[in-house]
């Protein structure tokens, strides 16, 4: 399972990268705004910075919502760096754009997916990745991980090449649940990745090992 970080914050990207487990980055307009990156030229320059920091896929989202606008923007984004994956929303013109990009060899991530039906459409249109938002599904009192499992099962039935990228991850437990049901990729906040490190028995055990060492090796 690949680990992406879901942020536009360069410090967080650098921290996850330093851990040695980072396979890529996803961003969206909300995350860009949260990091104070505004204005098209600044946003484009920021994508390039991220691509230079991480060896792996970097999702860059189109703002246009019409087919021609998405094609124009997606082609421009894909030319920024070979690792750019064009993020396209799950709307009718988005599906048409996914098909167009697929024909041109431009890699895509279909975002804002909340149902198996939407995931089937994205795969049929040739999306490279599909992003079901599991945390936001949980927020509505449905089970986000069941949706991930359902999409993984359906793609397996037909051999779709589209990778299931579980998004809107809210906890380390979400990451483990995605691994259990076979998600190809998880995109997570830094805290959910570093949260995987934690277990109280690890801390207690390490403290005891060090204390016993110090007893036999006084300074
Ligand atoms: O990758 C999608 C993600 O950024 C959405 O996460 O926490 O805003 O639901 P969230």
Image: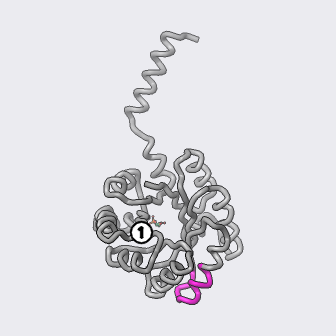
Residue 132 drawn in magenta: no
Q: Nearer the viewer, residue 123 or 211?
A: 123
Image label count? 1
Residue beneath the point at 52% across and 61% down: 6
Does residue 105 appear in the picture of this structure? yes
- In the image, residue 217 lies at what x, y percent? 53, 11
- Give the magenta range: 63-74
Image quarter in which the N terminus is found = bottom left
- In the image, residue 54 lies at what x, y percent? 61, 56
Residue 72 drawn in magenta: yes
Secondary structure of the magenta portion, mostly? helix
What residue is pinned by disc 1? Answer: 161
- In the image, residue 27 lies at what x, y percent? 55, 66
- Where is residue 168, by image quadrant? bottom left
Does residue 29 appear in the picture of this structure? no
Q: Is mark 1 within 8 Å of ligand 1?
A: no
Residue beneath the point at 33% across and 68% down: 151
């Amino acid at each position: 399972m690949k680990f992406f970080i879901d942020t536009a914050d360069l410090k967080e990207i650098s921290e996850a990268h330093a851990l040695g487990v980072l396979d890529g980055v996803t961003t969206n307009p909300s995350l860009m705004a949260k990091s104070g990156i505004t204005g098209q030229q600044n946003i484009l320059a920021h994508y390039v910075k991220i691509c230079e920091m991480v060896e792996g896929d970097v999702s860059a989202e189109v703002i246009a919502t019409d087919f021609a606008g998405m094609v124009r923007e997606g082609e421009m984004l894909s030319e920024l760096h070979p690792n750019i994956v064009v993020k396209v929303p799950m709307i009718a013109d988005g599906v048409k754009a996914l098909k167009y990009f697929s024909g041109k060899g431009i890699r895509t991530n279909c975002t804002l997916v909340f149902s198996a039906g939407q995931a089937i459409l994205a795969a049929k249109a040739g999306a490279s990745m599909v992003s079901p938002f599991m945390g936001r599904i949980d927020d509505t009192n449905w089970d986000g991980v069941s949706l991930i499992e359902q999409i993984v099962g359906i793609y397996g039935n037909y051999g779709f090449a589209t990778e299931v990228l579980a998004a809107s991850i809210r906890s380390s437990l979400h990451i483990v649940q995605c691994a259990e049901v076979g998600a190809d990729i998880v995109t997570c906040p830094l805290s959910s990745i570093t949260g995987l490190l934690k277990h109280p028995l690890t801390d207690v055990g390490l403290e005891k090992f060090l204390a016993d060492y110090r007893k036999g090796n006084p300074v």
